[in-house]
């Protein structure tokens, strides 16, 4: 190669030479292989077809809005549209010829009919006014003047407003093509004046085929798996994919693109890690699973990316279980075969459980202080999924216990200190009595009522006096014939529940035998509870209710409490169970009810004046009046 020697700063210094190697200018693939016709646009058939039909039928709108993610062809389609509508030799497939004066001027960048404006750096009102001034000049050659405004969402509010009228009623020869990545930032008045075209993210397969085409053009050896990884990493943006493509080519010296080079250069976790890890998890090999995680972390990968990739791996295995869902797996053909093979070894239940564990780890990872432990814990749980399933299967396989035969009811054997004949008899049992229980001041027990005749039970057959598992012995001491009788419950009483027996024996729960009381007695108990509430340091609002407001009897045992506001009502309702229990038990009447009502205010209460406030305070403290008089103070 020719070598040119120049001196520093243009001055010759003996002994100091600077060598520059003259080389050809390198053009990145995104510019070198930029589509120049609608047919070459990748992955946007719904848009290119619509634009071609509009040109063919002469139904062009006066304003277009191209919106979508970065690197999907918005500006490219705008330039192709601008070149095609001014082509003087339009082809039969509605494509520009590329050889007429208009096409050549556009390709050389000196067309006077196509104007591009970057709104990111020209977003003021003056920039839009200059654009409007240019719109007034008709084209000197060609049919249309096309104005392409890129990143139009960057225009200021005032610039949008200045642009509205021209965009709504432009000259018949002017066409505006707006492009943006953030449509939601554009004013609705602008959107309503444009035909909106939404660009899609480019599919992985379409992007892979385009990368294969470029690699063949550049005579670069490639592996389809490597190009597929680049397409996945680009996330739908072809420009990003071409940038990574150039990066891998430079890394390999312009010779080849392999799967290994791609994952090493782009810092991507190899599929092989996840396939091996899944085999260890299925084999319940916890140590090897943790060692693979340690290897991944040692290579510089983040634990969050690892757990996200593992969840995606299980997801691919799940969709690989059914042939109808294989199209949801965006991987190369070789990787798809590996997924299909491993999917046959995994059950759907395992995959669903593993996905749930991975998702929980994903959610908790950012919040955890020990993030590595979160991932390790998820792997340990995954290794024991099959063991848990086997344990459930074993438990379900055990024979179900048969229904036990109904046990014979124990016989009631009554033993006494009196000699009992061992012969069987069917005569009724004599009435069994305890000594009468006296009624004292501190211990009150009601005397047993005389036993009705129908409650006398037949004497059971006495077989033995020894206790057995099938018999229950009840010891009754020697009885005094003169004592008050206590009956043994009849069979009818034994069938009653405890709650039923309690209701029948408690006069307060029966709804009968309530003690009557007057209003004064009720208010006395009300004041007693108020003193009790004050001693318990309850809220001031509740104490105000008890001290200042007294219930009024509406009818027998029903009282009404008229409160001032909703706050008092809420405080009273919170404590109502306690006051009701106190009143009902103190007055021995369970029919007591207290209803609350808020008194409606007839008008707004006037605030106290300063004079009224002083008079109120002076009434409580006369020294304030003396202080005011001595210092000759005035009340404002």
Image (tube, rainbow, N blue to C red):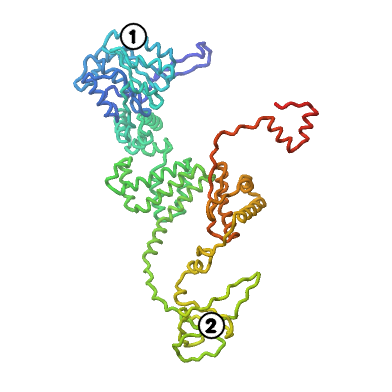
Q: Residue at horizontal 30%, vertical 8%?
A: 138
Residue that carries the numbered disc 2 in the rendered image: 432
Could you tell whether 105 is left or right of 150 in the image? left
x then y, percent, for residue 99: 24, 15
Q: Is residue 527 above or below residue 120?
A: below
Q: Which secondary structure, mark 1?
A: loop
Q: Can you see residue 557?
A: yes
Could you tell whether 618 is left or right of 350 in the image? right
Q: Which secondary structure, mark 2?
A: loop
**Quadrant in which residue 514 is drawn:** bottom right
Q: Can you see residue 338?
A: no
Of all residues shown, which one is farthest toward the left?
Answer: 92
The N terminus - image quarter: top left
Q: Residue at horizontal 54%, vertical 59%?
A: 590
x then y, percent, for residue 74: 34, 25
Report the number of numbered marks: 2
Determine the CA span between mark 1 and mark 2.
123 Å
The label on residue 136 is 1
Earlier residue among tags 1 and 2: 1
Badge 2, how many Cα within 10 Å: few under 14, some, many 20+?
Answer: some
Q: Is residue 401 above or below residue 390?
A: below
**Quadrant in which residue 56 is drawn:** top left
The C terminus - image quarter: top right
Badge 1, how many Cα within 10 Å: few under 14, some, many 20+?
Answer: few
């Amino acid at each position: 190669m020719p070598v040119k020697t120049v001196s520093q700063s243009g001055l010759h210094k003996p002994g100091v030479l600077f060598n520059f190697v003259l080389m050809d200018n390198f053009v990145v693939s995104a510019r070198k292989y930029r589509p120049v016709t609608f047919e070459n646009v990748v992955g946007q058939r719904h848009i290119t077809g619509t634009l071609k039909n509009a040109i063919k039928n002469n139904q062009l709108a006066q304003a277009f809005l191209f919106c979508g993610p970065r690197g999907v062809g918005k500006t490219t389609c705008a330039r192709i549209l601008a070149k095609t509508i001014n082509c003087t030799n339009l082809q039969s497939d509605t494509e520009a010829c590329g050889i007429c004066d208009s096409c050549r001027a556009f390709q050389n960048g000196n067309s006077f009919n196509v104007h591009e404006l970057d709104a990111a750096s020209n977003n003021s009102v003056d920039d839009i006014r200059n654009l409007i001034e240019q719109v007034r000049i008709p084209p000197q050659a060609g049919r249309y003047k096309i104005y392409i405004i890129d990143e139009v969402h960057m225009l200021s509010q005032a610039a949008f407003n200045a642009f509205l009228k021209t965009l709504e009623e432009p000259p018949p020869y002017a066409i505006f093509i707006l492009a943006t990545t953030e449509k939601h930032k554009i004013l609705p008045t602008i959107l309503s004046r444009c035909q909106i075209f939404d660009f899609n993210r480019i599919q992985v397969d379409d992007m892979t085929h385009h990368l294969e085409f470029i690699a063949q053009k550049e005579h670069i050896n490639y592996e389809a798996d490597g190009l597929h990884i680049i397409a996945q990493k680009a996330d739908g943006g072809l420009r990003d994919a071409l940038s990574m493509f150039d990066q891998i080519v430079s890394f390999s010296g312009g010779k080849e693109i392999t799967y290994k080079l791609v994952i090493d250069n782009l810092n991507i976790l190899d599929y092989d890690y996840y396939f091996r890890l899944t085999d260890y998890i299925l084999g319940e090999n916890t140590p090897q699973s943790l060692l693979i995680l340690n290897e991944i972390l040692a290579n510089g990968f983040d634990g969050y990316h690892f757990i996200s990739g593992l969840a995606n791996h299980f997801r691919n295995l799940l969709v690989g279980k059914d042939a109808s869902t294989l199209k949801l797996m965006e991987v190369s053909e070789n990787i798809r075969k590996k997924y299909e093979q491993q999917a046959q070894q995994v059950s759907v239940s395992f995959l669903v459980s593993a996905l749930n564990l991975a998702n929980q780890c994903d959610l908790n990872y950012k919040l955890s202080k020990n993030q590595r432990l979160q991932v390790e814990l998820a792997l340990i749980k995954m290794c024991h999924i099959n063991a848990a399933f086997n344990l459930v299967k074993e438990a379900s396989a055990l024979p179900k216990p048969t229904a036990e035969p109904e046990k014979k009811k124990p016989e009631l054997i009554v033993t006494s200190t009196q000699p009992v004949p061992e012969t069987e008899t069917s005569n009724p049992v004599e009435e069994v009595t305890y000594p009468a229980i006296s009624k004292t001041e501190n211990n009150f027990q009601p005397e047993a009522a005389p036993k009705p005749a129908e409650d006398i039970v037949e004497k059971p057959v006495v077989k033995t006096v020894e206790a057995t598992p099938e018999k229950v012995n009840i010891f009754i001491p020697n009885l005094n014939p003169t004592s008050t009788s206590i009956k043994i419950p009849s069979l009818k009483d034994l069938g009653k529940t405890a709650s039923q027996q309690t209701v029948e024996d408690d006069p307060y729960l029966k709804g009968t035998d309530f003690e009557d009381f007057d209003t004064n007695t009720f208010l006395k108990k009300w004041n007693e509870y108020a003193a009790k509430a004050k001693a318990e340091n309850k809220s001031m609002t509740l104490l105000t209710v008890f001290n200042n407001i007294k219930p009024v009897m509406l009818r027998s045992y029903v009282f009404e409490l008229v409160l001032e506001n909703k706050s008092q009502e809420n405080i009273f309702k919170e404590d109502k169970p306690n006051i009701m229990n106190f009143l009902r038990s103190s007055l021995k009447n369970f029919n007591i009810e207290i209803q609350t009502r808020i008194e409606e205010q007839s008008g707004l209460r006037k605030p106290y004046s300063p004079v009224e406030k002083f008079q109120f305070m002076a009434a409580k403290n006369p020294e304030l009046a003396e202080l005011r008089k001595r210092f000759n103070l005035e009340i404002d």
